[in-house]
Image: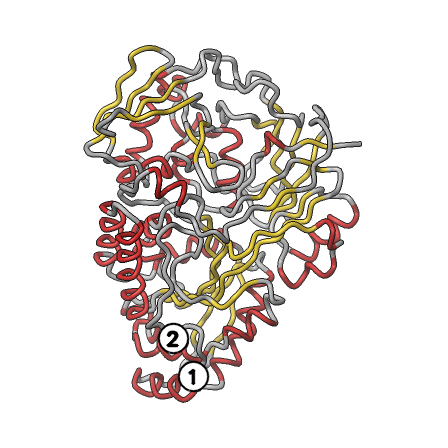
Amino acid sequence: MNLRNRLLGLCTAAAVTAVLVTACAPSSTTSSKSSDSGKPRDGGSITIGVGEALTTWNTVNALTVTDFQVIKEVFEPLVVNNADGTGIQGGLADSYSYDKSRTTLTFKLPPKATFSDGTPLTSADVAFSVGFWKKGGSGALYDTIKKVSTPNPHEVVFHLAAPNSGLLPVLTWASSAVVREDFGGKSAKDYFAHPVGSGPFMVNNYTPGSNEIVLKKNPTYHKAGLPHLDQVTYKVTSDPNQRVLQYKSGGIDVYDQVSPDLTVQLPKDELTSVPGAVLSAVTFNVRPKAGITSNVDFRKAVSLALDRKGLVDSVYAGQGSVAEAALTPHEPGFVKCGACDYPRQNIAAAKAALAKSGYKGQPVELAVDSSNASNVLAAQAIQPMLKAVGIKMTVKPQDVTTLISRATEGTIQMSITTYRATSLTLNDILSLWYSTSAFFSGEDTAPILAGVQAVAAAKDTAQLRAAAAQVEKFVFQSKFWVPVADLDVTFAVNPRVKGLTVNPLVLYNLSDIYVTG
């Protein structure tokens, strides 16, 4: 699976100071931008090729990378990540500020803000939205907001239970988007069936299950001069090789996340990359009913059998590095797991662990997203590695919707997945693990919740690193999640497309993009 960080995410927002959120990202954090020239031109359209379909318009139920990228263009959060992904700025809100005690957070709304149907957007809509957020799968994220007051139609105040500057990263998520008060008099189901948001774009054409999402410019958007494009089409094609052909023929203007093995087929000067933005990992179902994968020695055997360096060099075409931790490296507080043996393949130790597990030679299934060519290749490459230590593994590619359904039902034994954070907090990935019973593994989430709370209580980088180290220790001992590689993310961008900046969180703002010629 190639899911955006949180699946029905659930965590307590990190109580990290604004300094930590905006200034503690590693110095290696970079973003990639398509070459720019001259003044932005209004008008025109582009087509973006993606591998995963949109699964929902309901903001609190977003699942996939496509969901999170597209939804935020239609439903705008109060705050957003800045262009280079190193800080937070106003989105729907013109500005935000804390009082001296940092227990009230005030947002100023643009006086002329409206929804795309022309209905004025007011503080009452924000207040209603907070209640909606709390009722969704991500409800506990917003528990720190004890009360919402609306002094006037263009000002909304969040009264917090305690100082919690880490709430800001949470408010950039799609689950924090502002919706109409009372859904405009409709049920939530009917409202999201015909989305009306306040973002730079609005839905022009979309049929559930279709392979095309057409957005058009929102003429009522509150930010003057934006967006530049009249129309954006997302074309869903699960076969990555087909997307290469589409890009070469001009059928798509942007290839969103090119598989590493396919970059050689595209013009080098049209590629833009973000290093180490995605973590690949092998995940396990640890429930007793799952069979042998419930045995920690079996999981240890799999981890020790993996030739991670070989996978990076071959399957991932050298576009990444061997993972040295279970958490993602660009998050504030990240630490390498010094006691972990992830970088080292040890066949003898793998065989010893396998013998201890009681494995009897039964087939074990590894499920993989069929639209992710690199993960399919990785699964196929892992198969002989496991065979070398005596494990019989079968590879089962499936579409992402089926994988999510099976994962939720607990019927997957093993999978290979890619994960990326979309906000600057360690609780990004911890919220995913906690909310999904440790990413659908069935693992005990109490140690993860302890990690969430430790991150929430951290007051400086040292305390964040201590919290991260404790989480790393638990994940290494459990091995419900076995990291493989920190991968670069590459986009192919037609030279006529300007202003596309892919930040380290692998997000971009459609409103900034324009075309030439």
Q: Is residue 135 left or right of residue 420?
A: left
Say how the picture is coloured. Answer: secondary structure
At x 67%, y 42%, the residue is 34
Q: Are marks 1 and 2 in contact (CB under 8 Å)?
A: yes
Q: How many marks?
A: 2
Question: CA–CA distance between discs 1 and 2?
Answer: 9 Å
Give x and y (percent) for residue 413: 39, 68
SS category of the residue bearing label 1: loop
Give x and y (percent) for residue 432: 36, 51
Q: Is residue 112 above or below residue 169?
A: above
At x 49%, y 33%, the residue is 72
Q: Amino acid at mark 2?
A: Asp
Quadrant in the picture for residue 360: bottom left
Quadrant in the picture for residue 294: bottom left
At x 26%, y 61%, the residue is 470
At x 29%, y 43%, the residue is 14
Q: Nearer the viewer, residue 33 or 365?
A: 33
Q: Amino acid at mark 1?
A: Asn
Q: Is residue 80 left or right of residue 152?
A: right
Q: Nearer the viewer, residue 475 or 95?
A: 95
Give x and y (percent) for residue 52: 56, 48
Residue 346 tag number = 1
Q: Is residue 92 left or right of residue 216?
A: left
Quadrant housing the C terminus: top right
Q: Is residue 133 above or below residue 446?
A: above
Give x and y (percent) for residue 291: 33, 73
SS category of the residue bearing label 2: loop
Q: Earlier in the sequence, mark 1 or mark 2?
A: 2
Residue under label 2, please give it: 341
Q: Residues within 10 Å of mark 2 (few under 14, many from 20)?
A: some
Q: Is residue 193 above or below residue 483?
A: above
Q: Residues within 10 Å of mark 1 (few under 14, many from 20)?
A: some
